[in-house]
Amino acid sequence: MEKKEQLYEGKAKKVFRTENPEELIVSYKDDATAFNGLKKGTIVGKGVINNKMSNLLMQKLEKAGIPTHFVKELSDRETVVKRVSIVPLEVIVRNIAAGSFSKRYGVEEGVVFASPTIEFSYKNDDLGDPLINDYHAIALKLATEEEIETIKKYSFAVNEQLKAFWKECGVTLVDFKLEFGRLSDGTIVLADEISPDTCRFWDAKTGEKLDKDRFRRDLGGVEEAYDEIMKRLSEHI
Ligand code: TMP
């Protein structure tokens, strides 16, 4: 599989065309941003970890019946994925209050929910990815009602799979962000990545943060946290 011209460069990944019109190559960078690109930095080795973690978890989800864009890992930083058109919604599933949820509703971080929650943000950098509800997403033609139902069903299924897996690794899955895409025939599949950039991982014993919040909040030990969470995964996958 050969990389052809670059189609797109995002904050954390580049996307290339291949000889197959239905497949793309993604290349993971070490670049890190937060607060809609306001804060910029580098997390050395992040691209390799996010590539490998995302691929291992997506393969696990496929086995559990959740369709994903994953095709084949090419190298440390590069993966072949199915070409999709991204549904412009960031889907956030939460098990425990943290981050913007805690801030918005004045709830202390760490409050455990009786059942998981889901919310959507409209993927639009100019608008700062605003929170959006199902009716607004349908009105804006971002997705159909049926697609939103499918996305919700898959997102909660992802949560159950990942929560159980990370528990085995001694890690609490606090929350995470997913993105979905449409294949050329309209089938909805899980796309983008599942990594410490897009999930909150807390050590189950100590509560230590093992994710990008260390970068967002200037907590230090960022690379060490990415190495540690990857080590936990490697030992249990
Ligand atoms: P939040 O609490 O800041 O809304 O974040 C919820 C989850 O989504 C958290 O695991 C981090 C992830 N996330 C992203 O992947 N991309 C983003 O741009 C933001 C704001 C959060």
Image (spheres, grey):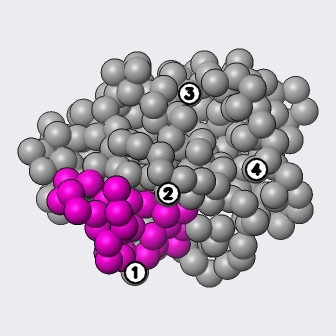
Q: CA distance from mark 1 to mark 2?
A: 29 Å
Q: Secondary structure under badge 1? A: helix
Q: Secondary structure at mark 3?
A: helix
The outermost residue toward the left is 185
Judged left or right of residue 3, residue 115 is right
Question: What amino acid type is highlighted by mark number 2?
Answer: Glu
Alpha carbon of mark 3 to alpha carbon of mark 1: how far? 32 Å
Residue found at x 34% / y 21%: 65
Q: Looking at the image, which residue is at 28% across and 49% down? A: 82
Q: Which mark is residue 78?
A: 2
Which circle's residue, 1 or 2, is located before the other in the chain?
2
- Rendered image: mark on residue 126: 1
115 is within the stretch colored magenta: no
Residue beneath the point at 69% across and 32% down: 233
Mark 4 = which residue?
Answer: 226
Q: How many marks?
A: 4
Q: Amino acid at mark 1?
A: Asp
Between label 4 and label 3, give the one nearer the viewer. 4
Judging by the rendered image, the residue that carries numbered circle 3 is 162
Asked if the magenta segment contains residue 20, the reply would be yes
Q: Nearer the viewer, residue 16 or 131?
A: 16
In the image, residue 6 above or below residue 116: below
